[in-house]
Image (cartoon, helix red, strand yellow):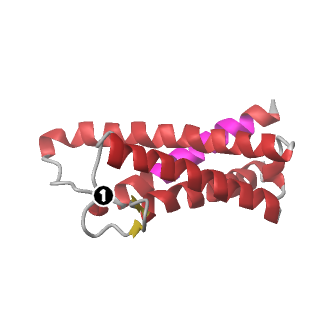
């Protein structure tokens, strides 16, 4: 039960962090602005995206747990566990961004977005899936240990 509580809390924390990241990075995407009449839909869409990213964060946590054969690995970080999280998060983000921008054309970057050379994916969305899962696990761990 404690493990499920951890995963649920991780999902909530990660979703909030991802939402804040998504909104703060809007200037780096080709985006003309949101008319006031469409603002509610804009916010709803970004909460939906953030919730999906929250689920990805939980999936990354579980995948690293399988790789290190320890479902509770987030209680104690090690260099190996952290590297697994960084590598898996990096690969996930590169795959999603490449597909969305180069294959499916779901979104485009503004000229201000720094790109990773050769693969032409944005640095910021890749950093999002590297940094936010780590900080979400850390905050969730601290939050639950104080209860």
Q: How far from the left and from the top, in percent, is residue 29?
A: 28, 57
Residue drawn at (82%, 40%), measured in percent from left and top?
71
Q: Name the one closer to the observer, 54 or 113.
A: 113
Q: How far from the left and from the top, in percent, is residue 2?
A: 81, 35
Q: Can residue 27 be seen in this view?
A: yes
Residue drawn at (12%, 47%), measured in percent from left and top?
35
In the picture provided, is 40 more to the left or to the right than 131?
left
| Residue position for label 1 | 26
Residue drawn at (44%, 65%), measured in percent from left and top?
123
Q: Name the one closer to the observer, 75 or 86.
A: 86
Q: Single out the residue that lies furthest toward the front.
A: 118
Q: How far from the left and from the top, in percent, is residue 129?
A: 54, 54
Q: How far from the left and from the top, in percent, is residue 65?
A: 79, 43
Magenta: predominant secondary structure element? helix
* Magenta-colored stretch includes residue 6: yes
Crowding at label 1, few (<14), some or many (≥20) Cα neighbours within 10 Å? few
Q: Give the range drawn in magenta.
A: 5-18
Q: Single out the residue that lies furthest toward the top.
A: 1
Q: Is residue 77 visible?
A: no
Residue 26, relative to residue 113: is it above or below?
Answer: above
Q: Quadrant of the N terminus?
A: top right
Please identify the quarter of the rendering in which residue 87 is found.
Answer: bottom right
Q: Name the one closer to the observer, 32 or 95.
A: 95
Residue 83, relative to residue 57: is it above or below?
Answer: below
* Magenta-colored stretch includes residue 70: no
User: The residue tagged with tag 1: helix, strand or loop?
Assistant: helix
């Amino acid at each position: 039960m404690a493990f499920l509580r951890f995963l649920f809390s991780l999902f909530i924390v990660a979703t909030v962090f991802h939402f804040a990241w998504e909104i703060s990075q809007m200037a780096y995407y080709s985006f003309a602005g949101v008319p006031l009449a469409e603002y509610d839909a804009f916010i709803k869409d970004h909460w939906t995206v953030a919730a999906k990213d929250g689920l990805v964060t939980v999936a990354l946590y579980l995948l690293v747990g399988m790789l290190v054969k320890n479902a509770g690995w987030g209680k104690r970080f090690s260099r190996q566990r952290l590297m697994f999280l960084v590598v898996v998060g990096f690969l996930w983000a590169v795959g999603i961004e490449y597909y969305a921008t180069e294959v499916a054309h779901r979104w485009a970057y503004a000229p201000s977005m720094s790109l990773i050379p050769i693969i032409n994916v944005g640095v910021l969305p890749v950093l999002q899936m590297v940094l936010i899962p780590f900080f979400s696990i850390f905050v969730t761990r601290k939050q639950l240990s104080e209860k």
